[in-house]
Image (cartoon, rainbow, N blue to C red):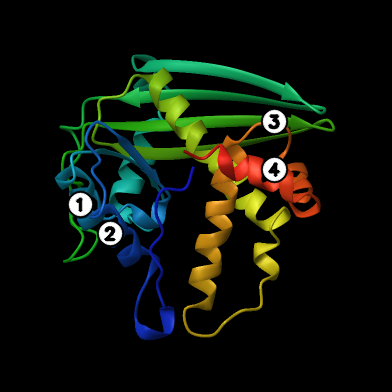
Amino acid sequence: MVIGQEGFRAPEGDSEILAARALLRCLDLTGHLVTADAIHCQTETAQVILDQGGDYLLRLKSNRPALHDMVKQAFDDTAFRADLDQAHTTDADHGRLEERTAWVCHDVSWLSGPKSSPQEPVLLPGLACLGMIEATTTRDGKTTTTRHYHVSSRPLSAQAYLTAARRHWSIENGLHWVLDVTFDEDQARNRKDNGPENLSILRKLALNVLKRAKPGMSVRRKRKRSGWSNAFARDIIGQMR
């Protein structure tokens, strides 16, 4: 479910990072784990999440070179991983087999070194654990392996870490993919003033309603039936109380 949206205008100097911080400051995050892509693996963003009462689980990539290199080098060492908490899952569907293994390191005291830049210290505030997920996918006889690194302010178990990361990845299928395929969001041509942001809000409101309402059918089918039948549309909207 989409619970908030903050727009930004790149030509005016805004950015996704600043928009995310503005949105986070509007939310009570007490007891919640906030997951985000590597672009948001920033000291100030992490602090905002903590200030709002939440914890963070952030993807770690080369935009944080010093921290990324240290974490990658550590997890590349088989001996280092041997004593860590570990979890494993296997999924198979439509001719695809995917195995995921997660490791979590709760000792972050060994992390030290130079700043990646004067403005960006190596460590994030409240850092409690480091994690790596190794995903091996086999399809049509071809196997690929990728590794993903994360940092978190919550001392997660390997299973909790793997579950949280998978839920984050599911957003692509449960939100962005649906908005694109079912609502044709990527084909939208409105560019003027507040039009893009307003229509984006309306699409997400409609998606929230359609996903929560009965009967249990796809969002695409419920959207089409709502367009064909005023009675069906009223029933769908009437469930949102």
The amino acid pointed to by label 3 is: Pro
Marks 3 and 1, how far apart at CA: 39 Å
Left/right placement of residue 138 relative to residue 9 reads: right
Lower sequence index among marks 3 and 2: 2
Helix, strand or loop at mark 3? loop
Decide which of 71, 22 is in the foreground and name it.
22
Residue 215 is marked as: 3
Name the residue at 18% across, 65% down: 119
Marks 4 and 1, how far apart at CA: 34 Å
Residue 219 is marked as: 4
Q: How far across and how far down the image is residue 190, in percent?
A: 61, 79
Mark 4 near mark 2, Cβ–Cβ under 8 Å?
Answer: no
Name the residue at 40% across, 28% down: 77
Left/right placement of residue 77 relative to residue 147 reads: left
Q: Quadrant of residue 28?
A: top left
Helix, strand or loop at mark 1? helix
Lower sequence index among marks 4 and 1: 1
Q: Which residue in the structure is indicated by mark 2?
A: 21
Q: Residues within 10 Å of mark 4 (few under 14, many from 20)?
A: many
Q: How far across and how far down the image is residue 45, in percent?
A: 25, 54
Q: Which residue in the structure is indicated by mark 1?
A: 48
Marks 4 and 3, how far apart at CA: 10 Å
Q: How far across and how far down the image is residue 231, in percent?
A: 72, 45
Name the residue at 30% across, 66% down: 18
Helix, strand or loop at mark 4? helix
Mark 2 near mark 1, Cβ–Cβ under 8 Å?
Answer: yes
